[in-house]
Each structure stands twice: as structure tokens, then as C-alpha cells.
Amino acid sequence: MKESFHAGYFYFKNGFIIYTVSTDGFDVNAFTCDLKYRYWVMVHPTYLNYHVIIPRAGFADEAYAYFFTANYDDVRERVANYCLTYVEFESGNVGRVCSSALKAQPLGARVFRGRVYVAVRGSVVLFEGSKLVRRVGVSLNGRVLMQANAKYLALAYDSKACVFTSTLKSHECFNAGGEVQNLKLKNNQLYLKTKNKTLKLKITTKKTWNLKIKYLNTILKNLYLN
């Protein structure tokens, strides 16, 4: 059996987690900011003959740590069980979606009320529970920032941004005029921060795609979705 070990950590507002990967599995230990131990959870177990867990990517937002993994069978020399596992820091609750759609390079993820959005190279994928609901082609090719609420999903990569309806049935993409450093989605308002300016967009279901742009520190737009 191949030996495999990998470790890392993520910070949150009220503490941090340390994760470790070995031939026995993939687990997380959580601590408060003053180093008090909170909990231990198994993130990704071993499967049958698939002994070595490969951490394909990992990152965190303000609430969750996300881990994209696959299992490698060193006897049959094959990889399977591509999964996104997410750990809610405050509760220690673990969720998981597994799909061949996750074979592509994972670039970002977001969880909102049972919906799991995953950005992979070339597309955005929506899971509800463990079921793959929809996959939409988008030319993603780098790290993706993501926000979601009850009505919309917003994402940004490089100098581009997209807004989707929450079910991914409709979306619009546009050029933000500079590399997006941060984004915030609040109700039907989207805020994008680039190096030189802040963009504020109003998302509407009325057809007002006649954009009026003010070239000031703030750019105002109406973003129409079908």
C-alpha cells in the first residue's frame, strides 16, 4: 500500500481547523481561538480497495471548509469516488456530494439551504442533497469567488462575473473591468470590488438590459435575468 500523508488548516471567525490525510482516512480537528479543543470528525473514509485518499483541493469561506477528494486503488491503479465534502465549522456537521462531474479541476463551492454549488473547470454544477440537478457551461479557468442566497448565485473569476437564478435555469455574465477581488450578494444587490473601483448591480426580472454606466468609483447596472 502506498503511504500518503498531507495536512493543513483553515481559520474562521471563532477558531480554526486542522485537517490530516493518511492511508487511514481524512479527518478534521477543530479548536477555538484560545486553543480549546472542540471536536473531531471523519471527513472522507476509505472505500473498499481504494486505500489512498488524494486531496484534490481544499479551501474555506466564512462558514465551511471544503475538500475535493478522490480515492486511489494502488492495486488496480485506478481513481474513483470523486467527492466534495464540506464541514460546517460551528457545528462540525459534515455533508458530501460524490459525482463523476467532480473529475474536472474544482475551483470553488458554496452551500446554501441544502443546495450545493460547485464550480469546476468549464461549468457550474448544482447538487440538492446528493443528487446532481443541473450543470451549466461557463468558461471558468481559475479560482472562483462565490456567494448564494434564496434567489441567486453570484460568482466571479478573473475580471468576469456571472449571476444565476438559484436553480441555474438562467444566468448573465459580464466584464467587471478589472480583476474581481471580492464580491457580496445581498437580496437582489450584487457588489463587486476590483483594484480601482466598486461595482453595484441591481438584479431584476424585468427586462432592463439597457445599461447606463457611470464611470466613477461606483458603477451602477441593472442585471436582467429571465
Image (cartoon, rainbow, N blue to C red):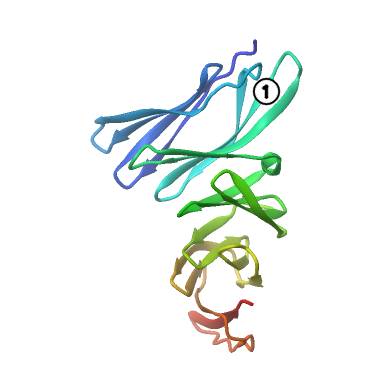
Secondary-structure class at tag 1: strand
Q: Identify whether 181 is placed above or below 32.
A: below
Residue that sits furthest to the top in the current view: 1
**Tag count in the figure?**
1
Instruction: Decide which of 138, 195 is in the foreground and name it.
Output: 138
Residue for point 61% across, 73% down: 177
Please indicate whether residue 140 sits to the left or right of residue 90 in the image: right
Q: Position of residue 15 (x, y in %)?
A: 31, 40
Instruction: Decide which of 217, 174 is in the foreground and name it.
Output: 174
Q: Identify whether 67 is placed above or below 24.
A: below
Q: Identify whether 25 is placed above or below 218.
A: above
Residue for point 72% across, 59% down: 139
Please indicate whether residue 24 sits to the left or right of residue 32 in the image: right
Instruction: Report the amino acid beneath label 1.
Output: Tyr
Instruction: Decide which of 10, 188 is in the foreground and name it.
Output: 188
Q: Position of residue 169 (x, y in %)?
A: 65, 66
Please indicate whether residue 170 sits to the left or right of residue 89 in the image: right
Please give the residue where the numbered disc 1 appears in the rendered image. 72
Instruction: Decide which of 107, 43 is in the foreground and name it.
Output: 43
- Identify the image quadrant of the C terminus: bottom right
Q: Position of residue 11 (x, y in %)?
A: 38, 42
Q: Position of residue 57 (x, y in %)?
A: 58, 38
- Identify the image quadrant of the N terminus: top right
Residue for point 59% across, 89% down: 212
Please indicate whether residue 89 sits to the left or right of residue 144 in the image: left
The residue carrying pointer 1 sits among few (fewer than 14), some (14 to 19) or many (20 or more) residues within 10 Å by Cα, namely many
